[in-house]
Amino acid sequence: MKNKIIKLLVKLRLIKDPKRKEKRHALVGSSKRWKIKQDFQIKFLKDQGLKEDDVFLDIGCGTLRGGIPIMKFLNVGNYYGVDIRENAIEEAKNELREEKLTQKIGDLILFDKFENLQINTRFNKMLAFSVLIHLSDDILYECLKFVKNNLTDGGVLYANVNIGDNDQGSWLEFPVMFKTLDFYKSTCDKLGLKFDVLGELRELGHISGDELSDKQLMLKIYKA
């Protein structure tokens, strides 16, 4: 009976759906682990020295699962998010309205290809959380080329990656990609980039119970 009453009140828009965030953030990952992913991203970035006046780009911002606390921390206008999925961007806008942060965001951009993505801002901090793991070799190259062209001198991109040489399945419409560190080094070398390995996600505080995710490596990518 209680559940029926809640569903009726939600339908009548008298209360918000208590599971709305689970449903929304299921577009970018596990609906049951969205809060773990959110908490990890802001803590990790602060541990890496994120400052309020940093100009920040969230590559693959999705539904702002991770972006909301980052945006709250940063100065007004310093958070930018980009994504290729229209439904994710629409839900991100809904999230912004519900969190009353529409006046704080720098921009939220829907794009189709990294080659076509134009932003008249340079960033000293970027994050691509659970993004590179879904990119084929050619798209990864264009992504990192975009990063190189839009990073300030001394700026960094943080990105988690699967390490291996065999791709394993897919998630939604995206492949799940595994690449060697030598591949990342070769690609970065071509673009005048370098990277440091910061450790496995679980060593950095990402304890989700998903072995595949927890053992991913976090890279810190910057201009050579």
Image (spheres, rainbow, N blue to C red):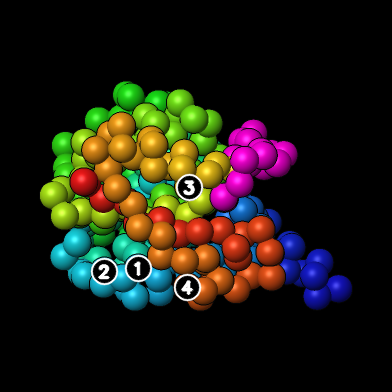
The disc label shown at residue 18, or none:
none
Tell me the distance, in whole angstroms, between the alpha carbons under discs 4 and 1. 11 Å
Q: In this view, does 11 lie to the left or right of 107?
A: right
The secondary structure type at the circle numbered 2 is loop
The secondary structure type at the circle numbered 1 is helix
Picture layout, residue 220 above or below residue 147: below
Picture layout, residue 16 above or below residue 156: below
Tell me the distance, in whole angstroms, between the alpha carbons under discs 3 and 2. 26 Å
Q: What stretch is highlighted in magenta?
A: 162-177
Tell me the distance, in whole angstroms, between the alpha carbons under discs 3 and 4. 19 Å
In terms of depth relative to the viewer, which is nearer, 129 or 24? Answer: 129
Marks 2 and 4, the one that precedes in the sequence: 2
Q: Name the residue under label 4.
A: 204
Choose mark 2 or mark 4, whichever is in front: 4
Marks 3 and 4, the one that precedes in the sequence: 3
Q: Residue at x 29, y 48 (%)?
A: 194
Tell me the distance, in whole angstroms, between the alpha carbons under discs 2 and 1. 5 Å
Q: Mark 2 points at which residue?
A: 50
Marks 3 and 1, the one that precedes in the sequence: 1
Q: Residue at x 20, y 69 (%)?
A: 52
Q: Mark 1 points at which residue?
A: 45
